[in-house]
């Protein structure tokens, strides 16, 4: 077991530590302290929203001492220089329209997140579909034929399948076999079982990896005990 401390000047709590060799992980407490299982030559990755990721190789010296102190480099977000053109009128609307750019701006250029794919079909709320003053005949038809119900189910399954693929890719089949005795040919089914019966999907999305691992431990005991029944 390796014990360590992150010694940043600020934001020492909630820094994620991942052992990329074994896929075990830990999170620093409010004082920057953490503990994680390691072996010699394992690689730890320290990551946080406000800091550059940092890799640390567990050398024989670090392994023997069992203690690691580390400081991360703060990630400073700066905007590119802004150059104001001449002939500004003082009218914001007119000046903005007259600004010429070399390329079309997108979400990445201004440092914010945004949707870039094809928009999904909007499911009209049932109350709005039957609203007396604005009855939506197309929406009523889609409710009556079960189209919206099937669309909701499809989106739910698509999201679960995508989450399962990301989880397997993140932890690797070898991890599930060694840690929880989940056969590789049953792994996808096991992940979907966890998603349906726990908060694994949400915890993984929110990087609550301790919650994810706790769910894997609890659900694997149930799932492995049922494997003979599943095979039959």
Image (spheres, helix red, strand yellow):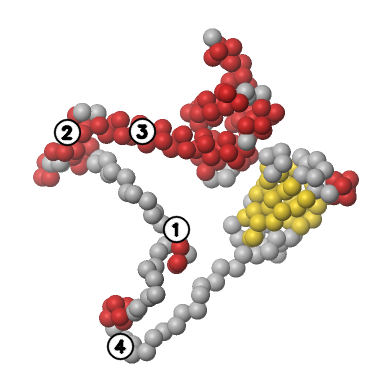
Number of the label disc, if any, that sits on residue 63: none
Is residue 194 shown above or below 42? Answer: above
Kindly tell me whether residue 194 is visible in this rendering: no
**Pointer 3: what residue?**
154
Question: Which residue is identified by label 1?
Answer: 113
Helix, strand or loop status at disc 4: loop
Query: Which of the marked residues, 4 or 1, is nearer the chain's N terminus?
Result: 4
Q: Disc 4 to disc 1, how far (Cα)?
A: 32 Å
Between the residue at mark 3 and the residue at mark 4, the CA separation in whole angstroms equals 53 Å
Earlier-in-chain disc, 3 versus 4: 4
Q: Residue at label 4?
A: 89
Say whether marks 1 and 3 touch (CB < 8 Å): no
Using the image, determine if residue 93 lies above or below residue 148.
below
Which structural element holds mark 1?
loop
- Which label sits in the foreground, 3 or 4? 3
Residue 210 location (% of width, % of height): 63, 39
Residue 105 appears in the figure:
yes
Q: Which mark is residue 141?
A: 2
Q: CA distance from mark 4 to mark 2?
A: 54 Å
Residue farthest toward the bottom in the current orientation of the protein: 87
Where is residue 22 shown, x and y percent of the image? 71, 38
- Which numbered disc, 2 or 1, marks the residue that appears first in the sequence? 1
| Cα gap from disc 3 to disc 2, whole angstroms | 19 Å
CA distance separating discs 2 and 1: 35 Å
**Mark 4 and mark 3 in contact (Cβ < 8 Å)?**
no
Q: Is residue 128 above or below residue 109?
A: above
Residue at image location 74% in from the left, 50% down from the top: 33
Out of 103 and 165, give the one closest to the viewer. Answer: 103
Q: Measured from the top left, where is residue 41 in percent x and y? A: 80, 45
**Label 3 SS:** helix
Is tag 3's residue or tag 2's residue first in the polypeptide sequence? 2
Residue 130 lies, with reference to residue 3, above or below; the image says above
């Amino acid at each position: 077991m390796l014990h360590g401390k992150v010694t940043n000047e600020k934001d020492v709590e909630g820094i994620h530590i991942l052992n990329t060799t074994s896929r075990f992980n830990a999170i620093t407490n409010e004082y920057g302290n953490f503990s994680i299982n390691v072996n010699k030559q394992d690689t730890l990755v320290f990551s946080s929203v406000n800091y550059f990721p940092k890799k640390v190789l567990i050398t024989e010296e670090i392994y023997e001492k069992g203690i690691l102190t580390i400081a991360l480099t703060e990630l400073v977000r700066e905007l590119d220089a802004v150059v104001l053109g001449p002939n500004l009128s003082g009218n914001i609307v007119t000046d903005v329209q007259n600004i010429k750019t070399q390329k079309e701006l997108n979400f990445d250029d201004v440092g914010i997140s945004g949707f870039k794919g094809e928009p999904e079909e909007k499911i009209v709320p049932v109350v709005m579909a039957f609203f007396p003053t604005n009855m939506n005949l197309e929406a009523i038809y889609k409710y009556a034929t079960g189209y919206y119900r099937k669309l909701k189910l499809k989106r739910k399954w698509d999201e679960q399948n995508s989450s399962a693929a990301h989880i397997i890719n993140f932890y690797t089949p070898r991890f599930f076999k060694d840690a929880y005795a989940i056969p590789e040919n049953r792994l996808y089914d096991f992940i979907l079982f966890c998603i349906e019966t726990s908060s694994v999907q949400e915890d993984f999305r929110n990087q609550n990896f301790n919650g994810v691992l706790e769910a894997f431990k609890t659900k694997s005991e149930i799932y492995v005990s049922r494997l003979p029944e599943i095979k039959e």
